[in-house]
Image (cartoon, rainbow, N blue to C red):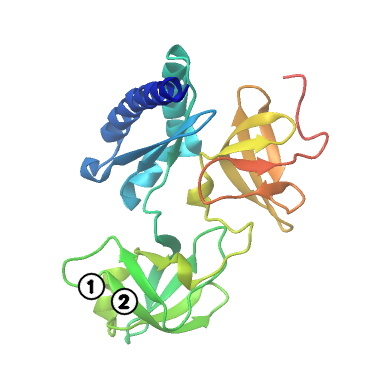
Amino acid sequence: MPEVDAAQLEGEAMLSDRIADLVEYLVVQIVDDPDSVSLEVIDGEDASTIEVSVAEDDVAKVIGRRGRTIKAIRTLARALAARLDTAVEVEVLGLRSQYKNIARVVKPHGRKGEVLAQPLRGLPSVLEPGMRVALTPPALKRDRFCTVATVNDTGDGDLVAFEGIDDLTAAEGITGCYVLANRDDFELDSLDAAYTDLMGREVVDERFGSLGTIVEIMSTPANDVWVVEGDRYGEVLIPVIEQVVLNLPDQGAISVHVMDGLIDMDK
């Protein structure tokens, strides 16, 4: 019955496109750069995934404080999906693709163009001499891409010199910029992820199913702790250790095995 199967798949794709239209409308109302909003619908066997790409500066707006905005968008998308007798998930990509946000320029240092760059919270320092990076937001009077000349660890971040940034004025011009590096130019451990990449992500336990979304990240001397909130179990604290976090992909749901006693089963 190949004709029936094809028709069914086409029908499911049309339903997910209707939900994507709703998601796009909601996101466009939130962001400052609506022209950078794009959506891709990936239809799977059990559910469709709507990947939302926005400008880097708009990622935080779409996620919202404590993940509330993206949670509201997902709730509306899931409600429409339920009415259409289908299932859907919404993920925010930002400027994902080839480059990853790894650090932020905090302040200039000296008169020769050096700057202090701090890794994004949750990431180690991965800047190295010779690395080709992008500085965002871009400026009209300088190239968006530049090469790292030198890197020195200060204990409070990296003292970095970029080729072409050779005086105090130029260094002041990139203060506050984010540093993006090609994913092929560095490696991260399996549990390394920037906080902005984690907020609003769904966490799924292999035994209990969806626990909710990450709304806060707490730092402790031993390890980070994700604060996950959901309708079914309320607030769940997830220690970020290898025994608990089973799979931390660049996007989509995070798989965990929660230790006994961390979930309030009476909720």
Element marked by disc 1 = loop
In x, y percent, where is residue 144? 26, 69
Count neighbours of disc 1 (C-alpha within 10 A) and say few if under 14, some if 14 to 19, many if 20 or more.
Answer: few
Q: Is residue 193 above or below residue 179?
A: above
122 with respect to 175 (left or right): right
Residue lying at the far right of the rendered structure: 260
Which residue occupies 54% across, 28% down?
Answer: 46
What residue occupies the far front of the structure in this picture? 1
* Closer to us: 89 or 264: 89
The picture places residue 121, in percent across and down from the top left corner, at 54, 58
> On the image, numbered disc 1 is attached to which residue?
143
Q: Report if the CB atoms under discs 2 and 1 are less than 8 Å apart.
A: yes
Question: What type is the residue that disc 1 sits on?
Answer: Asp
Q: Residue at x 45, y 25 (%)?
A: 2
Q: Residue at image x 73%, y 53%?
A: 241
Residue 144 higher or lower than 34, as above or below: below
Q: Which residue is mark 2?
A: 146
Q: Is residue 101 left or right of residue 137?
A: right
Residue 238 image offset from top left, x and y in percent: 70, 42
Q: Residue furthest top?
A: 83
Around disc 2, counting alpha carbons within 10 Å, would you say few (fewer than 14), some (14 to 19), or many (20 or more)?
Answer: some
Residue 127 x/y as whole percent: 48, 75
Identified by mark 2, the residue type is: Cys
Q: Quadrant of the C terminus?
A: top right
Q: Secondary structure at mark 2?
A: strand
Q: Which mark is residue 64?
A: none
Residue sitting nearer the eye, 139 or 98? 98
**Mark 2–mark 1 distance (CA, rounded to whole Å):** 7 Å
Instruction: Write the residue at 23% across / 72% down.
Output: 143
Describe residue 234's horizontal placement relative to residue 127 as left or right: right
The number of numbered badges drawn on the structure is: 2
